[in-house]
Amino acid sequence: MEAMTISAIIVAAGRGARLGGDVPKQYRLLSGRPVLGHTIRSLLASDQVTEVIVVINPRDGALYAPIAESIADDRLKPAVLGGDNRSVSVRSGLKAAAGDYVAIHDGARPMVPLDALDRVFTQARRTGAAFLALPVTDAVWQVTDGKAATALPRDAIWRAQTPQVFERRAIMAAHAAHDGSADDDVAIAVAAGLDVLPVRGSQRNIKITFAEDLVLAEQQLGTHMDIRTGNGFDVHKFGDGDHVILCGLKIPHDRGLVGHSDADVAMHAVTDALFGAIAEGDIGQWFPPSDPQWKGAASEVFLRKAAERVAARGYRISNIDCTLICEAPKIGPNSERMRHNLAAILGLSLDRVAVKATTSEKLGFTGRQEGIVAQASVLVFKP
Ligand code: MG
């Protein structure tokens, strides 16, 4: 069989008054991207679609331009102008379309699944006209004077979705013969005597009409939470002294840790993990050892800075996990107070902060008690 070309016509010229607000619903953000951007991409996802023609309102050019620019696909053709009346907009799209078939789709249906597209394209190729729809499962009542009057036979009732797919010449002729007042293109095709077959659509293929539809669509798209991890690593060597400072806690020891600041190796690792999670360099870049103002500094200053940067970028810390590697001093008896210190500085609940310790079985430089190693992992997220 010769390949049949399909033009997708996305009708996006309406003003969406029911949603409220100044921005038409097809330009509202859904998971950080305009609804219409999702819609265009969902149709381009089908390799059966040979071109996409978006019909926009003449007033929406500035809203549409960045969407078109963000989509690098030659099949997306220049937008055509429509109007407030749906049929007028569809006719503008039909005039620009070149495909053997046209798939007319609502701009405010951002999530039509690929398998549903496959089903409706296949049916349309067989019989000339098909549309996505869902059988009604609720009881359906005709209401008269505000009261349930007549139960309708739901077996015979389908809720229409889009795309609605037709042979291009047939639907153009149907539009030419119609006065244009119709809820959808199935109505126009049926009025022209075409047989239009319902094909099982999808619950995902919702139409954004009311504000709560955007919330529902967000949920269906899944949580697009921006989650990042970071890890930090630090080493400080032992030198003269009578204590070490770990996670801000002064622990008596027969040696001290050598460093430009207070040599809090654990807090340095946590700080670097936070800088790493947001890809903002490391502790050495923020606080150069060559800068005398950090001499002997309490490392809490560094940690607070990293936490401040995480917050400034819109992230929240989910948890911190820090491991110290040393033979001595003993970390276990001190780890609770160390956790408390970190939790207090970072404003976290205690159950989100872990401080653990291990030895290296007397192997290597930590085994020879020449220094302490600290490693840290963090997870940050943008709600
Ligand atoms: Mg350090």
Image (cartoon, grey):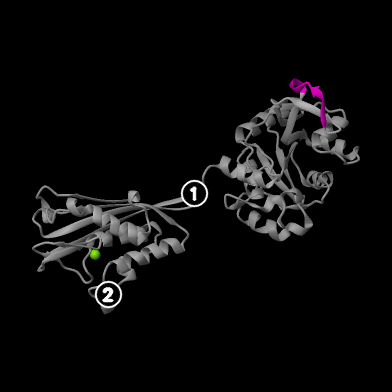
Q: Nearer the viewer, residue 139 or 93?
A: 139
Residue type, label 1: Met
Can you say whether 148 is above or below 281 in the image? above
* Ligand 1 visible in quadrant: bottom left
Residue reaching furthest to the bottom? 292
Circle 1: is it few (<14), some (14-19), or many (20+) Cα within 10 Å? few
Relative image position of residue 322 (x, y in whole percent): 27, 53
User: Image quadrant for the N terminus?
Assistant: top right
* Residue 282 in view in this figure: no
Relative image position of residue 154 (x, y in whole percent): 75, 23
Residue tagged 1? 225
Can you say whether 72 is above or below 280 in the image? above
In the picture, the disc for residue 316 is: none
In which quarter of the view is residue 193 placed?
top right
Residue tagged 2? 294
Q: Nearer the viewer, residue 370 or 219?
A: 219
* Residues rendered magenta in the picture: 147-156
Please give the name of the residue rendered at 29% of the width and 56% of the height, measured from the top-left corner.
340
